[in-house]
Image: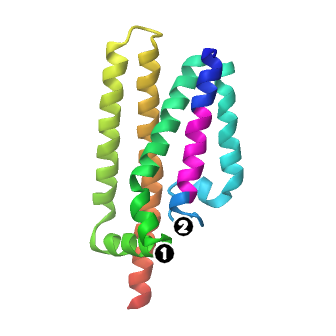
């Protein structure tokens, strides 16, 4: 198997894992963190599979995409048990109750704190890898995942906290 084909396969596995794990967790997309994917659902997922072509144009970029895609699926699956056990509506209700007791700055600080540690781990690989070494691109893929995780989580938390405030306002 060529490097290009292997990376295309890894990207496909990562993208398929993202789509399947997302729909396993939130079939109606109620709990989806990515606002674009939540709004446009299937077109976003289909376009995501176009990333499988990246290795045929740029191998280092494909390494970054593959690493980030695999980490997205891993992250999704780490939370799947709770969402599947409770169901979307109950999971959202739990998130809304939690948001009502907390603050948006607290939630955002933990998400961005997590992203900093992803960046630090990525930085180790980038720092220790020679120029154009594959470890450099693995590190950049981890950093890309950390950034995407922080952005999507931030959008998700802003939406949940807004809905929690609306719910409290409607109850009063």
Residue at image x 44%, y 87%? 170
Relative to 89, is 52 above or below?
above
Q: Is residue 89 left or right of residue 47?
A: left
Image coordinates for residue 85, horizontal then vertical, percent: 42, 68
Residue hosting label 1 = 89
Residue at image x 69%, y 28%? 53
Image coordinates for residue 8, horizontal then vertical, percent: 63, 27
Within-10-Å neighbours for mark 1: few <14, some 14–19, many 20+: few
Image quarter where the N terminus lies is top right
Majority secondary structure in the magenta region: helix
Q: Earlier in the sequence, mark 1 or mark 2?
A: 2
Between residue 104 and residue 126, name the one nearer to us: 126
Image coordinates for residue 108, horizontal then vertical, percent: 34, 54
Q: Is residue 144 left or right of residue 7?
A: left
Relative to 164, is 145 above or below?
above
Residue furthest to the front: 1
- Tag on residue 72? none
Q: Place residue 138 in its image quadrant.
A: top left
Residue at image x 64%, y 14%? 2
Q: Is residue 14 magenta?
A: yes
Q: Is residue 25 magenta?
A: no
Residue at image x 58%, y 58%? 23
Q: Are marks 1 and 2 in contact (CB under 8 Å)?
A: yes
Residue hosting label 2 = 30
Q: Place residue 71 in its image quadrant.
A: top left
Q: Place residue 83 in its image quadrant.
A: bottom left
Give the residues in magenta: 11-23
């Amino acid at each position: 198997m060529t490097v290009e084909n292997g990376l295309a396969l890894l990207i496909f596995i990562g993208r398929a894992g993202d789509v399947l794990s997302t729909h396993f967790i939130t079939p109606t997309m109620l709990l989806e963190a990515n606002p674009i994917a939540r709004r446009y659902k299937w077109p976003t997922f289909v376009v995501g599979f176009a990333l499988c072509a990246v290795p045929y144009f740029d191998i280092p970029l494909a390494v970054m995409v593959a690493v980030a895609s695999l980490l997205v699926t891993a992250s999704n699956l780490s939370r799947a048990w709770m969402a599947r056990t409770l169901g979307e509506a109950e999971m959202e209700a739990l998130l809304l109750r939690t948001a009502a007791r907390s603050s948006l700055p607290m939630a955002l600080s933990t998400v961005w704190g997590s992203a900093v540690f992803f960046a630090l781990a990525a930085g180790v690989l980038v720092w220790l890898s020679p120029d154009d070494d594959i470890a450099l691109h693995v590190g950049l893929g981890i950093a890309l995942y950390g950034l995407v995780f922080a952005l999507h989580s931030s959008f998700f938390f802003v939406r949940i906290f807004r809905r929690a405030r609306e719910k409290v306002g409607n109850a009063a």
